[in-house]
Amino acid sequence: MGSTKMLLCTACGFQNLAGAEICSRCGGPLVDEHQYSPRNRLEQSVLYDRIDRLPLREPVCVQPETPAMEALRAMLAQRTGCALVIDQNGELVGIFTERDALMKVSEDLEGRGARPVAEFMTSPVQCLDSDVRLAFAVHRMDVGGYRHIPIRKNGRVIGVVSTREVFRHFTEILKGV
């Protein structure tokens, strides 16, 4: 018996069965009458580079019962804008971001800062697989309004990418154009 032919999604890089018209992972079209051809290195990077090409930050991890102020201190110490909230089973249950702190905690920092971060975190968490293309990642971050997004490989979170790393990557390419 012959091998099954696969069709690569140009948006997220997922291997779909040949003949499919919509990507099983991202829902993007697999049939494009007007295939776009990148004109420079920046466009090539956006279309073909994978998110794991960017430097992944080691995530700050806290437990759901961690006081919000303690999570903020850990974020400040690591100079990052988010903390991943991991339960006792090692499962990612939320993300606590600088935006969560500003919008939900800052009104009453003394009173709310001692409360569990689980009360202020964003859940469920949107994650991306390490092999998705930059175009897909940037689109997902834009549509969701995310500045930080956990990256996973084989179902396990391996780091966090922020819009800062994406812009830095594009800036380095533009310097060389």
Image: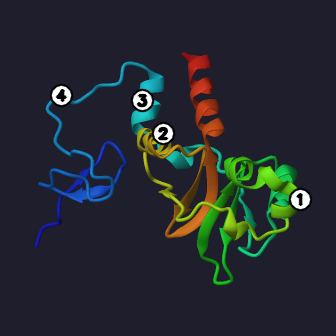
Percent of width and height locating residue 97: 68, 52
Q: Quadrant of the image for the N terminus?
A: bottom left
Q: Give the mark toward the camera: 2 or 3.
A: 2
Task: Report the amino acid beneath label 4.
Answer: His
Q: Nearer the viewer, residue 3 or 36?
A: 36
**Regarding mark 1 in the picture, which secondary structure is present there?**
helix
Q: Quadrant of the image for the C terminus?
A: top right
Q: Is residue 149 above or below residue 87?
A: above
Numbered label attached to residue 142 = 2
Q: Tell me the residue that label 3 is attached to.
A: 44
Numbered label attached to residue 34 = 4
Percent of width and height locating residue 11: 34, 43
Q: Which residue is drawn at 64% across and 57% down?
A: 159
Q: Give the mark toward the camera: 3 or 4.
A: 4
Decide if residue 2 is on the left or right side of residue 60.
Answer: left
Percent of width and height locating residue 111: 85, 63
Mark closest to the chain's N terminus, 3 or 1: 3
Q: Could you tell me how far apart the alpha carbons at marks 2 and 1 are, in whole angstroms? A: 33 Å
Q: Give the mark toward the camera: 2 or 4.
A: 2
Q: Which of 65 and 41 is in front in this view?
A: 65
Task: Report the amino acid beneath label 2.
Answer: Asp
**Regarding mark 2 in the picture, which secondary structure is present there?**
helix
Q: Residue at x 62, y 62 (%)?
A: 158
Q: Tell me the residue that label 1 is attached to.
A: 110
Q: In this view, does 48 lie above or below 87?
A: above
Q: Give the mark toward the camera: 4 or 1.
A: 1
Task: Report the amino acid beneath label 3.
Answer: Gln
Q: Could you tell me how far apart the alpha carbons at marks 2 and 4 are, in whole angstroms? A: 24 Å
Task: Report the amino acid beneath label 1.
Answer: Glu
Q: In which quarter of the image is residue 121?
A: bottom right
Mark closest to the chain's N terminus, 3 or 4: 4
